[in-house]
Amino acid sequence: MNSRRLFIKKSFFTLSSLPLSPLLFTSASSPPHRIKKGNMIYRRLGRTGFYVSEISLGSSPLPDWGLFREIIDRGVNYIDCSHTYMGGNAERQIGRLAREVGRDKIYVATKFHFRPQDTITSVIRTVEGSLRRLQFDYIDVLMTHGVSNPEHLTDERILTAFDRLKQQGKYRYRGFSCHQNHLQVFTKAIECNLYDVIQIGYNIYDLQKVENPIRTYPDYLGVSGIKELFQQAFDREIGLVAMKTLKVGGRRQDLTAYQQGTTSIYQAMLKWVLSNPYLTTVVTEMLNFQQMEEDLAVVGQEITEKEKRNLYRLVAKTSRLTCRMCGTCEKVCPQSNPLPTVLRYLHYFEGQEKKEWARQKFAQLKTSLQPCLNCGLCEKYCPYLLPVRQLFQEAQVLLA
């Protein structure tokens, strides 16, 4: 049985019978939001004008070469990467793919980390390293990786580096990814309107701001105010990319109880995210043939009410083991520890089987969780009532 998820066999659907969404064409004078070609639906990535497959490929890690080629042959045309993925080899493999299938057949987004010690020169040097590994003249979407501080979006070092690289023709559009503190970062991005693409963690658990625990929340985006931000970004023609979509709270578990007909819980998660009309694509990893079939089977499919109810049942059961990356704990931590990042690495270890990678990333944090085990301040302020100290104790044992 597959360790990432249970594959529910389902025939690849025929797009010829697909009803067209009201958002397929926005008006007679504006470009369509959605188009279909072969067995794939493509959505417009905001002001970039790129038509991107509804399901796109993450590269941490990439699938084996034969499957990689098959995924592209099946219509996936957007690949998300970073200069750190697979030690730089992800970019090398993507470059090889582009040379074989044609550079114009895929859109590539790659990212650079921004650290406090970085300078304009160091950022530019990192991006030039990505270009060498890709063997590209330019990057389609160049992103800042993992923005959690809203002020980083307008940091002069980043903006100047972007400007110089743009003048040199080394990328076409700029963006950023966000793993935590979503509400504040997303709000700042709308206000400054300096970025063409936003890649944000978005799944059935995320992006809720609450005062009291909520058992199920079919409209939590409306409660939190995030829903309006999605629409505002769309109205400003900022392309929206979803990541961290196939997230299940807690450890690996048998999810067959949440299957609806032939739809697995993971397919329902993808359909739920793609039901947001303001999003363009979902970045997901497809590491074997079964995962590819499972993911691509949802293209163009609408989520049913029964599938939604199953998702809410899952959230109700696992909510208190799932960190939403809101950043509250980090803000109140006396040690200023990157606590949401620690819990993200714990999820990679337990839920995604990325054990060695999670240990390596945790070691790079150089963080001791021992003071956190006796403090409990983060647990007191967690809006989701997570047993934070228990989770940190697990992290200390599994990751250290």
Image: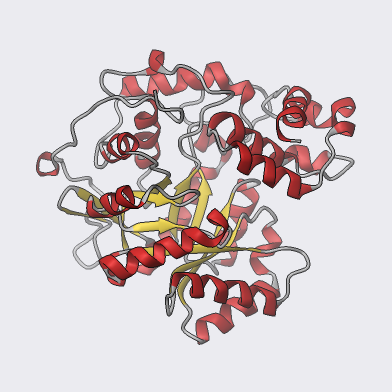
Residue 162: x and y in percent read 58, 76
Name the residue furthest bottom: 168
Query: Which quadrant holds residue 10?
Result: top left
Viewer-side residue, 355 vs 110: 355
Q: How are the residues colored? A: secondary structure
Viewer-side residue, 158 vs 345: 345
Q: Is residue 123 above or below residue 353?
A: below
* Side of 209 where 246 appears, left or right: left
**Is residue 278 visible to us here?**
no
Number of numbered discs visible in the structure rendering: 0
Q: Is residue 156 above or below residue 356?
A: below
Residue 133: x and y in percent read 49, 70
Question: If the image is split into quadrants, where does the C terminus sit?
Answer: top right
Name the residue furthest top: 257
Question: If the image is split into quadrants, where does the N terminus sit?
Answer: top left
Viewer-side residue, 298 vs 347: 347
**Is residue 342 visible to us here?**
yes
* Side of 305 where 396 appears, left or right: right
Residue at x-position 32% and y-position 23%: 305
Name the residue furthest left: 16
Residue at x-position 50% and y-position 57%: 198
Query: Which quadrant holds residue 189?
Result: bottom right
Residue 194: x and y in percent read 55, 69
Residue 340: x and y in percent read 70, 40
Residue at x-position 35% and y-position 18%: 259
